[in-house]
């Protein structure tokens, strides 16, 4: 009887050992046995040695999960980045088509203009791709019960949160480099190329049945056919507080021959009316069979001899704002425009981190059924709302003079707050 009991105990222990061997790797079993035996013989040094090795194996397992989740996040980010890139790219081509393509501008010049727009497109696409991509990826993990499996195996939410934060940070840095260095460089080259196109083909700036507002004048344009314009009306303010109205039935647009002149308007049957603001009863009328009007570059292309805020890096903007405050020679509106652009250099690129913070709990809370589809829907809706909030922030900042920091960072802080509240709710469950 004792013999059979002993055999049962031995077979029981062997079955346990085999189950452990099947469940764990040989290295883990070796470290586990060493940890148990060293504790049995009260050898603290060996116990500490084997304990550290076991902890390191757990870290390796955790790192494998982090790499797996980071890889999935990156793949979904690339797909969504391609989607938003195409959307913004097509929108840019359509904008160029209105003013450039239909004026028969050389193809090489058009390709260069599109290339100079790429940094802005990439900088805009990255944050939105982070939100939609992360929502779809994490939603898939929830729908496929992978998150439940991770939680059941003893893993914390930090295993998922860690790659989300790391990927969000890397994307933010990448977007910031594009927004802070390549975007100003592209804008400078774009404006320079656009100026060359206008000088070589002045008709680019003239569109049929439209109103062209220049810096100091307004053009009402009739029908445009290549270099000919019918029914052209010009309103401008002359020196000494006088107003001038010029009307021509037929106008030929010629290239400039003098430096600083953008185009020449050769008007047939011109009619000129000059009014005095101070005395409306006094006016002069001139008529002419032919008249030549020079349109200067600074009347159409805004240029004050300096660099616009969009053409500056964040460091240049910081020095410019500091100098403007020190000299105190600029208006509040001018200062706020630079302040808005400075904060925009950081708020939009680093919006990826706030989007990542929102995507993590949002996908885990609402992504139990068809997480990919819900992630796509939620992501696009939030992206549109965020984009509208940034545009409104710029408008209120420029027109109403509201603080540029809060106008640009307000949407990010709101998204981050919602993400933290959802995460706290998730942890309570």
Image (cartoon, rainbow, N blue to C red):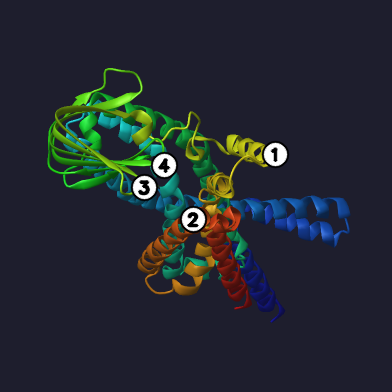
Separation of marks 4 and 1 at Cα, in angstroms: 31 Å
Separation of marks 4 and 3 at Cα, in angstroms: 50 Å
Q: Are marks 3 and 1 in contact (CB under 8 Å)?
A: no
Q: Within 10 angstroms of label 3, few (less than 14), some, or many (20 or more) residues?
A: few
The residue beneath circle 4 is 120
Q: Is residue 395 above or below residue 424?
A: above
Separation of marks 2 and 1 at Cα, in angstroms: 23 Å
* Quarter of the picture holding the N terminus: bottom right
Of circles 2 and 3, the one toward us is 3
Q: Are marks 2 and 4 in contact (CB under 8 Å)?
A: no
Looking at the image, residue 310 sits to the left or right of residue 329; the answer is left
Separation of marks 2 and 4 at Cα, in angstroms: 24 Å
Q: Is residue 173 above or below residue 286?
A: below
Q: Within 10 angstroms of label 1, few (less than 14), some, or many (20 or more) residues?
A: few
Which callout, 2 or 1, points at the residue further toward the start of the chain? 1
The residue beneath circle 1 is 326
Which callout, 2 or 3, points at the residue further toward the start of the chain? 3
At numbered mark 4, what does the secondary structure look like: helix, strand or loop? helix
Q: Nearer the viewer, residue 307 or 21?
A: 307
Q: Within 10 angstroms of label 2, few (less than 14), some, or many (20 or more) residues?
A: few
At numbered mark 3, what does the secondary structure look like: helix, strand or loop? loop
């Amino acid at each position: 009887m004792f013999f059979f009991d002993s055999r049962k105990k031995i077979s029981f222990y062997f079955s346990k050992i085999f189950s452990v061997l099947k469940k764990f790797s040989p290295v883990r079993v070796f470290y586990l046995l060493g940890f148990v035996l060293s504790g049995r013989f009260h050898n603290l040094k060996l116990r500490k040695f084997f304990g550290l090795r076991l902890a390191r194996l757990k870290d390796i397992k955790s790192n494998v999960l982090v790499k797996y989740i980071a890889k999935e996040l990156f793949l979904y980010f690339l797909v969504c980045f391609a989607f938003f890139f195409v959307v913004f790219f097509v929108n840019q081509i359509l904008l160029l088509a209105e003013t450039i393509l239909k004026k028969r501008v050389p193809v090489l010049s058009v390709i260069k203009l599109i290339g100079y727009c790429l940094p802005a497109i990439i900088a805009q696409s990255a944050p939105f791709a982070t939100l939609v991509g992360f929502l779809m990826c994490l939603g898939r993990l929830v729908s496929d019960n992978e998150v439940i499996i991770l939680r059941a195996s003893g893993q914390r939410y930090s295993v998922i949160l860690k790659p989300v934060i790391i990927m969000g940070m890397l994307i933010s840095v990448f977007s910031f480099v594009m927004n802070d260095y390549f975007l100003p460089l592209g804008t400078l080259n774009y404006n320079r190329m656009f100026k060359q196109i206008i000088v070589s083909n002045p008709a680019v700036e003239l569109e049929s049945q439209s109103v062209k507002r220049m810096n100091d004048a307004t053009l009402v344009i009739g029908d445009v056919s290549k270099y000919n314009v019918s029914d052209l009306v010009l309103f401008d303010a002359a020196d000494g507080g006088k107003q001038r109205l010029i009307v021509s039935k037929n106008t030929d647009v010629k290239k400039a021959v003098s430096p600083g002149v953008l185009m020449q308007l050769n008007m047939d049957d011109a009619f000129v009316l000059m009014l005095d603001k101070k005395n409306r009863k006094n006016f002069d009328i001139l008529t002419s069979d032919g008249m030549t009007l020079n349109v200067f570059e600074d009347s159409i292309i805004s240029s004050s001899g300096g660099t616009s805020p969009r053409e500056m890096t964040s460091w240049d903007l910081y020095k410019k704002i500091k100098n403007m405050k020190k000299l105190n020679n600029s208006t509040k509106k001018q200062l706020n425009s630079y302040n808005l652009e400075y904060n925009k250099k950081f708020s939009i690129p680093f919006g990826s981190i706030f989007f990542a913070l929102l995507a993590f709990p949002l996908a885990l809370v609402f992504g139990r059924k068809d997480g990919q589809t819900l992630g796509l829907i939620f992501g696009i809706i939030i992206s549109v709302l965020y984009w509208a909030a940034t545009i409104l922030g710029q408008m209120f900042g420029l027109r109403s003079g509201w603080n540029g920091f809060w106008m640009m960072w307000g949407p990010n802080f709101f998204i981050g707050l919602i993400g933290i509240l959802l995460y706290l709710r998730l942890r309570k469950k």
